[in-house]
Amino acid sequence: MVKYALRRILNAIPILLGITIISFAIIHLAPGSPLSQYIEDPTITALDKENMIKAYGLDKPLPTQYWEWLTGMLQGDFGISYMKNEPVLKIVIDRLPTTLLLTVTSFIISMLIAIPLGIICALKENSKFDRIVSGISFTGISVPGFWLALILLMVFGVKLGWLPTGGLQSISGSTGFWDRVHHMIMPISVMVFAEVAIWLRYIRSSMLEVIHQDYMRTAKSKGLLPGRILGIHGMRNALVPLATLLGLAVPGFVAGSLILENIFSIPGMGALFRDAAFQRDYPVIFAITTLGAVLTVAGNIFADISYAFLDPRVSLSKQEVKG
């Protein structure tokens, strides 16, 4: 298993390298320049413009710029932000906790709701409860998150005035824990509604497949208590595939939070990426896209390894085992 995990990690290195090369090339080949507002300023002399371009290394060939960025990144140096004139790593670390607060909280709440609901729907297959919950889940899957966010903003934020329309804390008055909770209700609700709808379908399908297995009927025929059958034989096997889906869902959580952060004006990674894109702050854009690529690849590796570890029926190929 250790060799298999190491092989998967080593295989991910050229993938990440390829992603960084493509991202670097696309961003630099896009029209415009991060120094356009200065270069086009008639009050700045030609010498000053030339010095600015050299200071940021934009006069060097693209392969040279990429190599310098890559070697610096491997040493933990993501460069200096063009607009903020601060280390990119510091800027990202300052914004990352907000995004993690949104995504982790939403995920925990989603699991606390989706797992019991999915199990109950499977046990009450085709019942009225199952049909109602399934209908709501299909609605959650179909409704775009940004549209639901705008509806909540209009109803609860503008018309009723029950919840703040944006930000992470009040400008004046109470700015403590409950004030932050008050601001996070709508964005977390949007994420939870979408994630519960998706995970509930997975859990229900997985549980339905398990409860119809022969070993479940055998356990029942032996006289085991229903709760013991469900807990030991049912949930234990039904939740195994979810470990793999969790790894694949990590990028989706992050991408969803980036969109909601812009809608609700939350100062997280989403707002940072938006500002960097508008201002052509290349170092910040590279750092965020690289982080997203790492999360995506890491999620896939986690999915592969966890499935092989949790389900003994899954056997690795002979080549991988020998490797």
Image (cartoon, grey):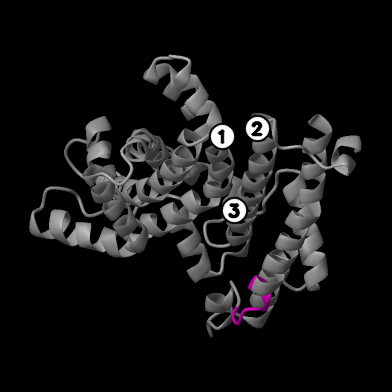
| Residue 151 relative to residue 124: left or right | left
Q: Is residue 80 above or below residue 229?
A: below
Q: Position of residue 250 (x, y in %)?
A: 53, 46
- Residue 28 among magenta residues: yes
Of 132 and 59, the residue lying toward us:
132
Figure quadrant of residue 289:
bottom right
Figure quadrant of residue 263:
bottom left
At x 54%, y 51%, the residue is: 251
Contact, mark 2 vs mark 1 (Cβ under 8 Å) = yes
Figure quadrant of residue 68:
bottom right
Contact, mark 3 vs mark 2 (Cβ under 8 Å) = no
Q: Amino acid at mark 1?
A: Val
At x 48%, y 15%, the residue is: 222
**Mark 1 lies on residue:** 240
Mark found first going from the N terminus, 3 or 2:
3
Q: Position of residue 204 (x, y in %)?
A: 41, 42
Of 72 and 38, the residue lying toward us:
72
**Mark 2 lies on residue:** 311
| Residue 208 relative to residue 23: left or right | left
Q: Is residue 152 above or below residue 184?
A: below
Q: CA distance from mark 3 to mark 2?
A: 28 Å
User: Which region is colored magenta?
Assistant: 27-32
Of 294 and 83, the residue lying toward us:
294
Q: Is residue 16 above or below residue 301?
A: below
Specify the label residue 292 is tagged with.
Answer: 3
Residue 221 visible in this rendered orientation of the protein: yes
Residue depth check, mark 3 versus mark 2: number of the one nearer the observer: 2
Give the position of the C terminus as an image quadrant. Answer: top right
Of 253 and 318, the residue lying toward us:
318
At x 30%, y 47%, the residue is: 126
